[in-house]
Image (spheres, rainbow, N blue to C red):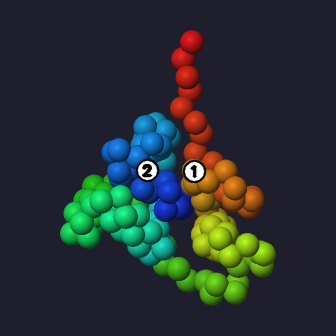
Amino acid sequence: MTWLLDVSALVAHLVQSHEHHARVNAWWPGRALAVCPITELGFLRVACALGSTMEDARTVLAESLRDEAPAFIPCDRHALDSTAITSPRKTTDIYLADLATAHGWHLATLDEGIAHPAADLIPELAVGP
């Protein structure tokens, strides 16, 4: 199975200070992962909003793409090909889940609010006794 990363998953993986960095990195190893232009652009936007310069954010992303070699999927569906939803806040989430589905993949996310059969919530870290 291949998982298309959503923006939250990619940000949590690449930003060490992110509250879910350990959670995503515990889930990450050995998985077939993918990115698309939306997740790459979202990472750059969020990394800069968190205080990185664009140059630093681009470097971090480039190193990750080089070292981890996730699959790349173009955004090859029209926005109107996605499932119709009523919330404008969920349009990108549903588009990404539909994009993953169109390629036989799932969407890896930290967002519990994505109601789509292809959206897989990255599990919480197990808490020891």
Q: Residues within 10 Å of mark 2 (few under 14, many from 20)?
A: many
Q: Position of residue 4 (x, y in %)?
A: 53, 61
Q: Quadrant of residue 16?
A: top left
Residue 74 visible in the displayed image: yes
Q: Position of residue 94 (x, y in %)?
A: 67, 69
Q: Residues within 10 Å of mark 1 (few under 14, many from 20)?
A: many
Secondary element at image label 1: loop
Q: Nearer the viewer, residue 83 or 42?
A: 42
Q: Position of residue 2 (x, y in %)?
A: 55, 57
| Apparent side of residue 57 relative to residue 70 in the rendered image (left or right) | left
Question: Residue 12 got which mark?
Answer: 2
Q: How many marks?
A: 2
Q: Is residue 114 above or below residue 41?
A: above
At horizontal 67% and vertical 51% (from top left) the residue drawn is 112
**Which residue occupies the extreme top position in the image?**
129
At horizontal 36% and vertical 68% (from top left) the residue drawn is 44
| Apparent side of residue 33 relative to residue 82 in the rendered image (left or right) | left
Residue 120 visible in the displayed image: no
At horizontal 77% and vertical 75% (from top left) the residue drawn is 85
The answer to whether the residues at label 1 and label 2 have Cβ atoms under 8 Å apart is yes
Measured Cα–Cα span from mark 1 to mark 2 = 9 Å
Question: Residue 16 got which mark?
Answer: none
N-term mark: 1 or 2 = 2
Check disc 1 and report the residue beneath it. 110
| Apparent side of residue 91 relative to residue 37 in the rendered image (left or right) | right
Q: Amino acid at mark 1?
A: Leu
| Apparent side of residue 21 relative to residue 91 in the rendered image (left or right) | left
